[in-house]
């Protein structure tokens, strides 16, 4: 593994500036959302640090790009810092992940002005399907598609962090139906 310090100024193309992530999360009913999916991404992600209100995540997308993401907060709105990193280093870091490496396919679905990300989990969480919608402001009120089930925003056990790090404790309690 290469050890290095991040330079004082990281090129803009490698950093998603600190942003507020504002999202709602739902279980999904049925699969007719697939008729409207416009993009498909294969994701593998793991957590190299995990605390109650913050995490450091490594994600590989389509095995061709990798990011290191720091998230702070537990509510609907969280601080998020994201940095592009070399794929080979991401692979090595995933080997040190706490708990499971999550495998999922993310489908993007445009519905009434909002992009919904539908995550279909593989591996240990096969059968779990969760939809997230990111918003510009907490007051945004996206219309819910008919394939959306129970809202699980704020339920920690449905967070990717918990799915990776608390698998054995939470597995039996997860509802896979909306």
Image (cartoon, helix red, strand yellow):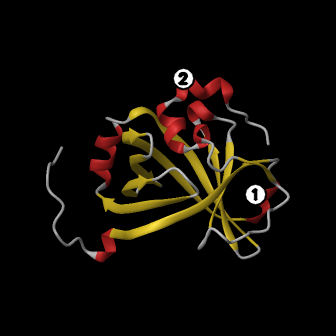
Residue 160 in percent (x, y) is at 53, 44
Q: Is residue 79 left or right of residue 172?
A: left
Residue pictured at 38% horizontal, 62% vertical:
81
> Marks 2 and 1, how far apart in space?
30 Å
Q: Is residue 69 left or right of residue 112?
A: left
**Of 110 and 70, the residue lying toward us:** 70
Which residue is farthest right?
146
- Name the element at disc 1: helix
Tell me whether circle 2 and circle 1 mark residues in contact (CB < 8 Å).
Answer: no
**Of 4 and 174, the residue lying toward us:** 174
Q: Splitting the image into 4 quarters, where does residue 64 fall?
A: bottom left
Residue at mark 1: 34
Q: Splitting the image into 4 quarters, where does residue 13 fall?
A: bottom left
Q: Quadrant of the C terminus?
A: top right
- Name the element at disc 2: helix
Q: Residues within 10 Å of mark 1 (few under 14, many from 20)?
A: few
Residue pictured at 33% horizontal, 44% vertical:
91
Residue 150 in percent (x, y) is at 78, 47
Q: Quadrant of the N terminus?
A: top left
Note whether 164 is above or below 7 in the view shown: above
Q: Earlier in the sequence, mark 2 or mark 1?
A: 1
Residue pictured at 63% horizontal, 42% vertical:
155
Q: Residues within 10 Å of mark 2 (few under 14, many from 20)?
A: few
Residue 175 in percent (x, y) is at 73, 34
Q: Splitting the image into 4 quarters, where does residue 117 fall?
A: bottom right
Residue pictured at 57% horizontal, 33% vertical:
123
Q: Nearer the viewer, mark 2 or mark 1?
A: 2
Residue at mark 2: 168
* Residue 93 appears in the rendering: yes
* Residue 63 appears in the rendering: no
Residue 66 in percent (x, y) is at 37, 56
Note whether 144 is above or below 149 in the view shown: below
């Amino acid at each position: 593994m290469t050890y290095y310090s991040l330079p004082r100024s990281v090129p803009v193309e490698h950093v998603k500036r600190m942003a507020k992530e504002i999202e709602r999360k739902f279980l999904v009913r049925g699969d007719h959302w697939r008729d409207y999916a416009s993009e498909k991404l294969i994701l593998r992600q793991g957590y190299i640090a995990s605390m109650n209100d913050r995490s450091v995540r490594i994600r590989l997308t389509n095995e061709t790009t990798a990011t290191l993401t720091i998230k702070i907060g537990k509510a609907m709105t969280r601080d998020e810092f994201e940095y592009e990193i070399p794929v080979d280093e991401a692979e090595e870091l995933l080997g040190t992940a706490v708990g499971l490496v999550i495998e999922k396919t993310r489908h993007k679905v445009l519905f009434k002005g909002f992009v919904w990300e539908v995550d279909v989990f593989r591996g240990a969480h096969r059968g779990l399907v969760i939809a997230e919608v990111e918003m510009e402001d907490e007051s945004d009120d996206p219309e819910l598609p008919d394939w959306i089930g129970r809202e699980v925003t704020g339920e920690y056990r449905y967070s990717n962090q918990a799915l990776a790090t608390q698998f054995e404790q939470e597995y039996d309690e997860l509802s896979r139906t909306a």
